[in-house]
Image (spheres, rainbow, N blue to C red):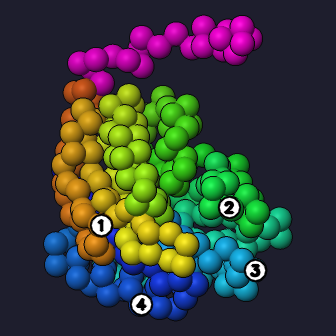
């Protein structure tokens, strides 16, 4: 089965949810002519990294974001992996991904498990506890957020359970662009899955972001790649390739997890 994916590599307006919703709406209208099956947004697309003001501008229980993407999904008959937003709840603020299917149903919710200290996330956000699984058009997928890709054991935990497509949403800085590309290709190769990675473009008062959203196949080959500028990256993936690659090199059958925990005891 072939699926068309569109990554909206937005320049996120710093601390301005209303403007960012307008930008998403505008870009989605543009990519609609290509009839994508799935549209992907970047990390913290409503606020950017305006962390000190999240108490004022975070989305109460994610209600606004869920309503917004649900309406867009129904209007355009498209699945939306809606990046992530700052969700405000009783126990604090989380960096939370929502996923809506074509009917507008919210079918996935995942809050970033690994908080990135270099950008002070641990000072303003709470880590999540959910897995990143969701199903779109019958395909088991997983979603993770930015820094998560530096933890291969977290990605592998999803691939072992059958996830065929990994969605990565990010605000990855330009100075570490080499890490971004290398880590994403490695996650695709070692888990024999498609990786759809949507990064933001532009800059905020403290960072310049890398862009370079990527669509990568289970062999680690780059199907499509954006540059550093705001754009929409569109590519097609063939899901039958996942099983072919996994059968050709059966790494999941050859795992020996009973030995992996022994190294932790040794050291």
Q: Are marks 1 and 4 in contact (CB under 8 Å)?
A: no
Instruction: Write down the region rendered in magenta.
Output: 246-267
Q: Is residue 264 above or below residue 107?
A: above
Q: Categorize mark 2 by other alpha carbons within 10 Å: few (<14), some (14-19), many (20+).
A: some
Whether residue 157 is visible here, answered yes or no, is no
Q: Categorize mark 3 by other alpha carbons within 10 Å: few (<14), some (14-19), many (20+).
A: some
Q: Is residue 60 above or below residue 223?
A: below
Return the residue at label 2.
121
Q: Are marks 3 and 2 in contact (CB under 8 Å)?
A: no
- Tell which circle, 3 or 4, labels the residue nearer the N-terminal end: 4
Quadrant position of residue 26: bottom left
Return the residue at label 1.
228
Residue 228: where, in percent of width, then height? 29, 67
| Distance from the alpha carbon under mark 3 to that under mark 2 | 14 Å
| Distance from the alpha carbon under mark 1 to that under mark 4 | 21 Å
Q: Is residue 43 above or below residue 22?
A: above
| Left or right side of 34 for 84 | right
Q: Categorize mark 1 by other alpha carbons within 10 Å: few (<14), some (14-19), many (20+).
A: some
Front tag of 1 and 4: 1
Q: Nearer the viewer, residue 158 or 240?
A: 158
Return the residue at label 4.
22
- Tell which circle, 2 or 4, labels the residue nearer the N-terminal end: 4
The mark found on residue 55 in the picture is: 3
Say what secondary structure mark 2 lies in. helix
Residue 124: where, in percent of width, then height? 74, 67
Quadrant position of residue 61: bottom right
Residue at point 26%, 36% (across, down): 220
Q: Nearer the viewer, residue 57 or 102?
A: 57
Say what secondary structure mark 4 lies in. helix
């Amino acid at each position: 089965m072939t699926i068309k994916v569109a990554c909206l590599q937005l320049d996120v307006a710093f601390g301005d949810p209303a403007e960012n919703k307008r930008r998403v709406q505008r870009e989605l209208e543009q990519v609609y002519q290509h009839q994508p099956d799935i549209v992907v947004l970047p990390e913290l697309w409503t606020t950017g990294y305006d962390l000190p003001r999240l108490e004022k501008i975070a989305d109460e229980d994610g209600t606004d974001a869920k309503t917004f993407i649900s309406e867009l999904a129904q209007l355009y008959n498209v699945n939306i992996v809606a990046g992530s937003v700052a969700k405000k709840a009783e126990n604090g603020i989380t960096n939370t991904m929502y996923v809506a299917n074509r009917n507008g149903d919210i079918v996935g919710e995942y809050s970033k498990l690994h908080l990135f200290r270099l950008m002070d996330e641990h000072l303003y956000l709470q880590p999540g506890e959910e897995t990143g699984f969701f199903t779109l058009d019958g395909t088991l997928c997983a979603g993770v957020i930015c820094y998560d890709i530096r933890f291969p054991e977290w990605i592998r935990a999803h691939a072992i359970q059958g996830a065929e497509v990994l969605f990565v949403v990010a605000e990855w800085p330009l100075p570490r662009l080499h890490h971004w590309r290398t880590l994403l290709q490695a996650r695709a190769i070692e888990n024999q899955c498609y990786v759809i990675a949507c990064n933001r473009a532009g800059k905020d008062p403290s960072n310049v972001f890398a862009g370079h959203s990527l669509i990568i196949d289970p062999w680690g080959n780059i199907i499509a790649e954006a540059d550093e500028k705001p754009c929409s990256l569109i590519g097609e993936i063939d899901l039958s390739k996942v099983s072919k690659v996994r059968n050709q090199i059966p790494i999941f059958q050859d795992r020996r997890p009973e030995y992996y925990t022994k190294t932790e005891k040794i050291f």
